[in-house]
Image (spheres, helix red, strand yellow):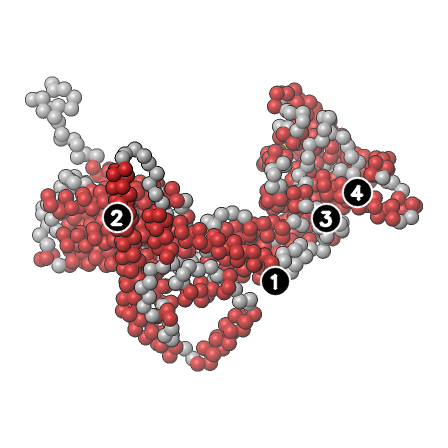
């Protein structure tokens, strides 16, 4: 018997080497399907949101997509596997066409990369494309690819041109981003002077101001800028051309049998090549949608109803195309490793190399503009004919009424053209950008309205019976001392969660009312978190907010507070006072237990850094003690009255926090880098749509005059309200200053 891996005569046993090949084919098909899915999702997203420049949200140039592409195109670089049949040879061609399609889809994603990331990804893609071209050339020479040679050579040429266009776009991105960022800052200062987003401004004014910020962010979005470059438009033509060549080869091979002499036999990939061919054909078809649409939209705009400057041939290569290369040329080589003669040769070589790169850049830009011009003249007649046919099909009265309606809509909206950011040579695109962007704010506000927090709105209706957010004052009116030497700061979320926990533990309360309260609080906490994340800039309350999130998770899912079964307490307790005393005692016990366990991680100088369970226990103790001091006999004996009071306090604290929503909307418009601005403003517009009714409810309630950092802290609001109450009381007659409790009287003395 021979050794393992050897035959009887001692030679290598290669009889089973080809057995895994069909499974490898399935792996290639799966990678091709992943590429197809990513490009399809980008196309659907662009069509759905009317972004006909098709941003690369799902399929962009990165390490993951490069790996998928390398696996999907394995057959095109397979040098020595026999591929005799029709589907085998077509699969070789489909892999080559897929590379062309993917490169064209990568174009807009360049704008979202940092300079170093951009360089690394371009180098990686360049190595991959050059390797693919070399391997295909070897297969053409060795006869592995023996048919469709002209198609392969043409696709190799298109692949190289698309790579050069991608590199040309990448050389432009850093300059355009820097220019548009500076332009955005100057326009932002102008818009900031004109805009006056206050807490009492109307929704219409707020929409107009958001439209200004959105116009600036949208037109300077690197995704959009990359997609409207001449090189990106030209890539759509070459991608479409590669798809046409592939379709021609497919039709010719299946319908013109006499033109080809395919070999007999079977590939080692066997049946998997058919699967790969089908999936890659779908991927090529789906992937052609976005580049073809970008090309068509550019041509459609530049073939208007009447001749204008957009139709004139323009071959000027703007400065931003070659600026970074000129900067590199001006930068001296800083090394002293060789003699004067060697440094001189290196300097001249660098200049010659950069001169060649500048020449290549100019040539690629000129080629792109030439392709665009040829496309305009070749397609313009058909587009104009289609427009005329559409006009003739429509009734003149309908057209006139539609024009009148559009004119009235346009006149009712502010002119925002001077807020549109553009590059040199893009002046003719301003109208197109404004046309595609004319009602985006209204569209997203309508989308936001569909997702309004209905339960939260019902909770905030309780504010009508409690004007001035009185529940904020009642939350800590008795000034109960902390369980430790110092009081930790409070956020709005933790008292809301604590009051809700107490409400769940009340006896004899309809469970439907409890579930409704939980739904209301759940929706409210989402918006409270948003407000506090934005207003707590120094993250002083981050640990307290985390405590609220962890406690709420247990309350919402299990009706438990720090492992205390709240529903069990509701069945065992007889009166609300018993529940408050029981929760207060359990909170004190929990605090002592947690403090013993966390002595090493509990810094005395910073109560805000306490462990989350200690913060939750301390808050529960203070709230329960405050309710025990401030409640009357009716509330102690009637769970329904106590439940209504707790619900009103929750509504007041939530409303007081959400009164800062307009500030948050304004802050979201101003934060983030150039890549994130459009996303932030879009979130702000959606938030306005979701909270429009909430803002209407809260607009009648005045917001305290605190600095933004203090607005997220309920402690500052309590202190301010007590100071205002004392000042107003002091200005009136002494008879109106009778304290309701001893503790409140002591507070007035202290302030005085």
The x, y position of residue 173, in whole percent, is 38, 51
Q: Which mark is residue 204?
A: 1
The local secondary structure at tag 3 comes to loop
User: Which of pointers 3 and 4 lies earlier in the amino acid sequence?
Assistant: 3
Camera-side residue of 240 and 274: 240
Q: Residue furthest front?
A: 340
Q: Which mark is residue 352?
A: 2
Q: Are marks 3 and 4 in contact (CB under 8 Å)?
A: no
Within 10 Å of disc 4 (Cα), the crowding (few <14, some 14-19, many 20+) is some
Residue under the point 10% across and 43% down? 142
Q: Is residue 47 visible?
A: no
In the image, taking residue 215 as reference, residue 27 lies left or right, namely left
Within 10 Å of disc 2 (Cα), the crowding (few <14, some 14-19, many 20+) is few
Residue that numbered label 3 is attached to: 704
User: Which of pointers 1 and 3 lies earlier in the amino acid sequence?
Assistant: 1
Residue under the point 27% across and 69% down? 378
């Amino acid at each position: 018997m021979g050794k393992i891996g050897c035959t009887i005569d001692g030679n290598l046993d290669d009889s089973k080497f080809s057995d895994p090949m069909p499974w490898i084919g399935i792996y290639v098909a799966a990678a091709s399907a992943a590429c197809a899915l990513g490009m399809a999702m980008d196309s659907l997203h662009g069509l759905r949101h009317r972004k006909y420049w098709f941003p690369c949200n799902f399929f962009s140039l990165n390490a993951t997509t490069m790996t998928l592409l390398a696996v999907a195109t394995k057959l095109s670089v397979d040098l020595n596997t026999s591929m005799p049949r029709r589907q085998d040879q077509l699969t070789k061609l489909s892999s080559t066409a897929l590379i062309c399609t993917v490169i064209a889809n990568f174009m807009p994603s360049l704008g979202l990369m940092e300079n170093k990331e951009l360089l690394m990804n371009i180098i990686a893609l360049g190595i991959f494309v050059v390797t693919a071209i070399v391997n295909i050339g070897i297969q053409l020479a060795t006869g592995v690819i023996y048919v469709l040679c002209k198609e392969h050579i043409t696709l190799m040429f298109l692949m190289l041109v698309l790579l050069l266009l991608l590199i040309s776009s990448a050389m432009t991105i850093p300059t355009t981003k820097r220019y548009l960022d500076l332009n955005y800052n100057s326009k932002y200062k102008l818009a900031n002077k004109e805009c006056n987003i206050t807490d009492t401004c109307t929704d219409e004014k707020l929409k107009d101001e958001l439209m200004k910020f959105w116009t600036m962010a949208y037109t300077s979005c690197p995704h959009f800028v990359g997609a409207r470059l001449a090189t990106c438009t030209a890539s759509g033509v070459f991608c479409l051309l590669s798809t046409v060549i592939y379709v021609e080869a497919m039709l010719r091979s299946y319908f013109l049998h006499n033109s080809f002499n395919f070999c007999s036999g079977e590939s080692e990939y066997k049946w998997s090549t058919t699967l790969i061919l089908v999936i890659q054909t779908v991927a090529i078809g789906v992937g052609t949608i976005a580049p073809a649409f970008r090309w068509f939209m550019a041509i459609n705009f530049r073939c208007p109803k009447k001749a204008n400057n957009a139709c004139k041939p323009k071959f000027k290569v703007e400065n931003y195309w070659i600026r970074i290369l000129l900067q590199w040329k001006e930068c001296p080589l800083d090394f002293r490793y060789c003699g004067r003669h060697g440094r001189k040769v290196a300097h001249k070589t660098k200049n010659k190399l950069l001169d060649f790169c500048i020449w290549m850049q100019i040539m690629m830009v000129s080629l792109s503009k030439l392709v665009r011009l040829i496309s305009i003249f070749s397609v313009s007649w058909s587009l104009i004919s289609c427009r005329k046919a559409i006009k003739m099909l429509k009734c003149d009265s309908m057209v006139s009424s539609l024009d009148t309606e559009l004119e009235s809509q346009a006149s009712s909206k502010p002119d925002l053209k001077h807020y549109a950011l553009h590059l040199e040579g893009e002046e003719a695109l301003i109208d197109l950008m404004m046309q595609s962007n004319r009602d985006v704010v209204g569209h997203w506000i309508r989308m936001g309205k569909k997702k309004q927090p209905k339960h939260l709105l019902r909770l905030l209706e309780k504010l009508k019976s409690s004007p001035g957010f009185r529940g904020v004052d009642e939350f800590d009116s008795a000034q109960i001392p902390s369980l430790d030497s110092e009081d930790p700061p409070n956020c709005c979320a933790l008292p809301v969660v604590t009051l809700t926990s107490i409400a769940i533990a009340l006896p004899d309360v309809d469970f439907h009312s409890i579930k409704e309260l939980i739904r209301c609080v759940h929706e409210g906490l989402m918006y409270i978190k948003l407000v506090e994340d934005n207003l707590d800039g120094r993250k002083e309350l981050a640990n307290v907010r985390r405590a609220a999130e962890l406690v709420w998770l247990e309350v919402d899912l299990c009706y438990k507070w720090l492992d205390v079964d709240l529903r069990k307490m509701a069945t065992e307790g007889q009166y609300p006072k018993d529940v408050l005393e029981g929760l207060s005692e359990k909170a004190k016990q929990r605090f002592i237990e947690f403090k013993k366990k966390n002595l090493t991680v509990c810094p005395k100088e910073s109560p805000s850094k306490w462990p989350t369970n200690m913060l939750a226990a301390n808050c529960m103790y203070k709230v329960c003690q405050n309710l025990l001091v401030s409640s009357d006999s009716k509330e102690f004996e009637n769970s329904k009255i106590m439940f209504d009071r707790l619900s009103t306090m929750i509504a007041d604290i939530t409303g007081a926090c959400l009164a800062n929503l307009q500030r948050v909307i304004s802050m979201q418009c101003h934060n983030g880098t150039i890549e994130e601005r459009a996303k932030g403003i879009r979130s702000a517009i959606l938030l306005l749509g979701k909270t429009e009714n909430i803002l209407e409810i809260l607009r009648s309630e005045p917001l305290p005059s605190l600095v933004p950092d203090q607005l997220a802290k309920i402690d500052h609001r309590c202190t301010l309200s007590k100071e205002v109450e004392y000042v107003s009381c002091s200005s009136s007659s002494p008879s109106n200053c009778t304290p309701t409790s001893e503790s409140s009287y002591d507070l007035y003395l202290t302030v005085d």
